[in-house]
Amino acid sequence: MTEVIFDSSFLMAVVERPTTWHEDLVEVIGNFQPVLLECVGAELLKLASGRGNRSRKARVVLDMTSNFKRLACGSARVDDEIVSAASSGKHLIATTDRELLKSARAAHVRVITLRMGRVALG
C-alpha cells in the first residue's frame, strides 16, 4: 500500500476549502496509508494553540489526522524532513507549498497537490 506523507499546507487547504480529497486520492493512487511526520504535527500544534480562525482550522486538522501513521523527524527543516522521509521509501508527498513541491520534484519524489480544489498527481 502506498504511503502518503502530508504537509500542513495540504491539510490546512482541505479544511479551509472542503474537497473530496480522500476520495480523489483513492481514485488516483488506490488505497493509501496517510502519514504525518512528528515535526509537521508540532507545526500544527503550535498553530492550534493560538486564537482565531487559522488556529481553529489547525485544531480540526489535528483531529482529522489522529489516525494517521506517525513517523519521527530528525533536526532538519520540516520541508527537508518531509523530502528525506519520502526519498527513503516508496512515499508520495501531499503539499500545496511551492518550495516543497520544487524540492520534492528535484529529489524525484512524486507529489500530490490541489488544482482548482481537486487532487492532482505531479
Image (cartoon, rainbow, N blue to C red):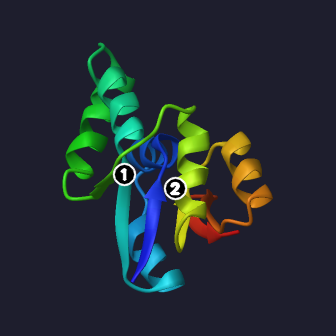
Between residues 18 and 90, which one lies in front from this camera angle? 90
As drawn, which residue projects farthest toward the top?
Answer: 51
- Residue designated by label 1: 36
Vertical comparison of 121 with 9: above or below: below
- Kindly tell me whether residue 95 is visible in this rendering: no
Q: Secondary structure at mark 2?
A: helix
Q: Secondary structure at mark 1?
A: strand
What amino acid is found at the position of numbered circle 1 in the picture?
Leu
Vertical comparison of 103 with 43: above or below: below
- Kindly tell me whether residue 83 is visible in this rendering: yes
Q: Quadrant of the C terminus?
A: bottom right
Vertical comparison of 80 with 29: above or below: above
Q: Quadrant of the N terminus?
A: bottom left
Vertical comparison of 96 with 108: above or below: above
| Horizontal and vertical percent position of residue 72 | 35, 46
| Horizontal and vertical percent position of residue 31 | 37, 83
- Residue designated by label 2: 85
Residue for point 72% across, 41% down:
99
Whether residues under marks 2 and 1 lie with C-beta atoms below 8 angstroms apart, the answer is: no
Q: Which labelled disc corresponds to residue 97?
A: none
Query: To which quarter of the image does residue 77 belong?
Result: top right
| Horizontal and vertical percent position of residue 102 | 77, 50
Between residues 112 and 21, which one lies in front from this camera angle? 112
Task: Decide which of tag 2 and tag 1 comes sooner along the chain.
Answer: 1
Residue for point 27% across, 58% down:
68
Q: CA distance from mark 2 to mark 1?
A: 11 Å
Badge 2: residue crowd in 10 Å (few <14, some 14–19, many ≥20):
many
Left or right, 102 with respect to 3, comes to right
What amino acid is found at the position of numbered circle 2 in the picture?
Ala
| Horizontal and vertical percent position of residue 107 | 74, 59
Between residues 108 and 121, which one lies in front from this camera angle? 108
Residue for point 63% across, 58% down:
116
